[in-house]
Image (cartoon, grey):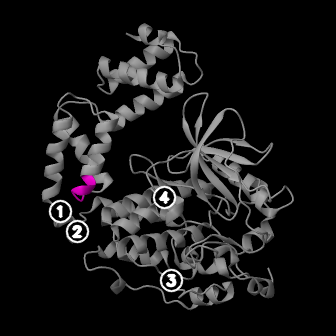
């Protein structure tokens, strides 16, 4: 891209967003915003509500009427036809995410390009990292580490395919109900032509991403992006999680060339920029991730993960954790009360989640305490109940439940110490969700 073209365009993409927070693609077509009717593209899906709108499309919450599953439906605005870069990027996003089977990347179920292009994907109700940081401010060090390790685990698989995400930011890190982070939105990702990507030479040097989380090479038309670009963006995330502050300060600037100057002229952070309680090793890791020169950063996710996992094995203690030592015991007693009959219902789980927040506990701590109480009372672990339910859904999805499937589920339930009563309850709930006949329930008892 020529420097003049790079400087010409203003961030009209930012309309309605805080400067620096919106994703931009500078060589895409500039068309006026168009509203889209909330309609389902087929009789199979019932549209329930709008989850969000962007410059390129809209995301709905929908119910799959065939199997009862809640999904997110991402629909491209009709103004972007097959001749546009945005259309091609939408298709590329589905290809990328659909090929990566990783627990830290949002699952793609299906793609429909027949009418209004849509991607059917996993619906995650746990919120996103941006919302979490706005509510909690500075995160506990161990939580920041756990989130970062999950993100890097997903990126590592993407990088092995040659994919560079280019838009790692808090709003694109979504949590499942257990608090595990998942990477979403590969809409501006770079992928080599040989792997099904767009024109590699042009795409690798185009300016795409979110300014607040861009690496210096992303705003330099003479440089290309690679996996180290995503590592830099993750470094910005880590810095923000640990300090509560953004790395860049654009002061309302909206012109891309000036934003690029701010990024290039910004000083690399120093150890003194972190709160006093931050582990020195973690500061050093973050600073290495944020080196302006890609050659001075971690060169790949595996190299970074090794350092992070070594850090997790060493004692981490912060003032924030010490000040809340009394609250885990209160929550532990609460969990014991709810588990008096050995089962926590969906309504009870929602109440437990509310109370854990009131006691100042983060989701990971709350989950760990529940698992400890379950072990103490010789009850199946919550993660094992989830695994059993997931396997049940897999076996019943094709509506063809065999004697072999029945035995496999019973063996899994016994392995996880799940009682016959609870196994049957899970089976019943799954079958209700799938709208199956109750005759199968009788066969399982």
Residue 326 in the image: above or below residue 61: below
In the rendering, which numbered label is found on residue 320?
A: 2
- Compared to residue 341, the image places residue 80 above or below, namely below
Instruction: Describe the element under mark 4 as helix, strand or loop.
Output: helix
Say whether residue 318 is visible. Answer: no
Quick check: 3 left or right of 384?
Answer: right
Given this view, does label 3 or label 4 mark the residue nearer the observer? 3
Estimate the x, y position of residue 257 in percent, counting from the top left: 68, 87
Label 3 element class: loop
**Figure quadrant of the N terminus:** bottom right
Q: State how far apart marks 1 and 2 are (Cα).
A: 7 Å
Q: What residue lies at 27% left-to-right and 47% top-to-bottom? A: 368
- Report, in whole angstroms, how far the alpha carbon at label 4 lies from the one at label 1: 27 Å
Stretch in magenta: 356-360
Crowd class of label 1 (few under 14; some 14 to 19; many from 20; radius 10 Å): few
Mark 4 and mark 2 in contact? Answer it, CB < 8 Å: no
Q: According to the image, label 4 marks what residue?
A: 151
Spot occupied by residue 194 in the image (x, y as percentages of width and height): 78, 55
- For residue 12, side relative to residue 329 (left or right): right
SS state under label 1: loop
Where does label 3 land, which residue? Answer: 248
Give the percent coordinates (x, y) of residue 287. Answer: 43, 78
Residue 144 in view (yes/no)? yes
Q: Secondary structure at mark 2?
A: helix
| Mark 3 vs 1: CB contact within 8 A | no
Separation of disc 3 and disc 4 at Cα? 21 Å
Alpha-carbon span between mark 2 and mark 3:
26 Å
Q: Which residue is mark 1?
A: 324
């Amino acid at each position: 891209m020529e420097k003049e073209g790079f400087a010409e365009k203003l961030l009209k993409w930012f309309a309605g967003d805080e400067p620096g927070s919106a994703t931009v693609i500078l060589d895409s077509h500039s068309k006026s915003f168009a509203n889209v009717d909330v309609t389902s593209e087929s009789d199979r899906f019932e549209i329930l509500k709008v989850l969000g709108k962007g410059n390129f499309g809209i995301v709905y919450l929908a119910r799959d009427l065939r199997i009862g599953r809640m999904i997110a439906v991402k629909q491209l605005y009709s103004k972007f036809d097959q001749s546009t870069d945005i259309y091609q990027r939408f298709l590329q996003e589905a290809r990328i995410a659909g090929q990566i089977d990783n627990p830290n990347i949002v699952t793609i179920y299906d793609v429909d390009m027949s009418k209004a292009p849509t991607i059917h994907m996993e619906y995650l109700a746990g919120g996103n990292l941006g919302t979490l940081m706005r509510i909690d401010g500075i995160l506990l060090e161990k939580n920041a580490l756990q989130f970062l390790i999950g993100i890097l685990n997903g990126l590592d698989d993407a990088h092995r395919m040659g994919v560079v995400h280019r838009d790692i930011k808090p709003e694109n890190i979504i949590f499942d109900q257990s608090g595990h982070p998942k990477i979403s939105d590969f809409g501006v990702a770079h992928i080599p032509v040989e792997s099904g990507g767009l024109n590699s030479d042009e795409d690798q040097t185009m300016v795409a991403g979110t300014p607040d989380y861009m690496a210096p090479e992303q705003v330099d038309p003479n440089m290309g992006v690679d996996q180290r670009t995503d590592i830099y963006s993750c470094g910005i995330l880590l810095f923000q999680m640990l300090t509560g502050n953004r790395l860049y300060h654009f002061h309302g600037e909206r012109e891309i060339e000036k934003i690029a100057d701010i990024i290039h002229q910004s000083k690399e952070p120093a150890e003194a920029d972190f709160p006093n309680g931050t582990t020195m090793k973690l500061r050093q890791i973050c600073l290495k991730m944020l080196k302006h020169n890609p050659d001075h950063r971690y060169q790949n996710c595996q190299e970074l993960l090794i350092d992070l996992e070594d850090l997790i094995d060493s004692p981490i203690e912060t003032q924030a954790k010490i000040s809340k030592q009394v609250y885990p015991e209160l929550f532990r007693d609460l969990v014991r009360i709810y588990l008096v009959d050995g089962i926590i219902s969906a309504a009870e789980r929602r109440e437990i989640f509310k109370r854990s927040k009131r006691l100042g506990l983060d989701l990971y701590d709350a989950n760990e305490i529940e698992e400890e109480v379950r072990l103490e009372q010789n009850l199946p672990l919550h993660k094992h109940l989830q695994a059993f339910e997931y396997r049940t859904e897999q076996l019943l999805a094709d509506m063809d439940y065999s004697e072999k499937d029945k035995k496999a589920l019973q063996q899994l339930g016994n392995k996880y110490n799940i009682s016959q009563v609870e196994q049957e309850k899970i089976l019943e709930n799954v079958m209700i969700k799938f709208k199956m006949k109750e005759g199968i329930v009788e066969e399982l008892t």
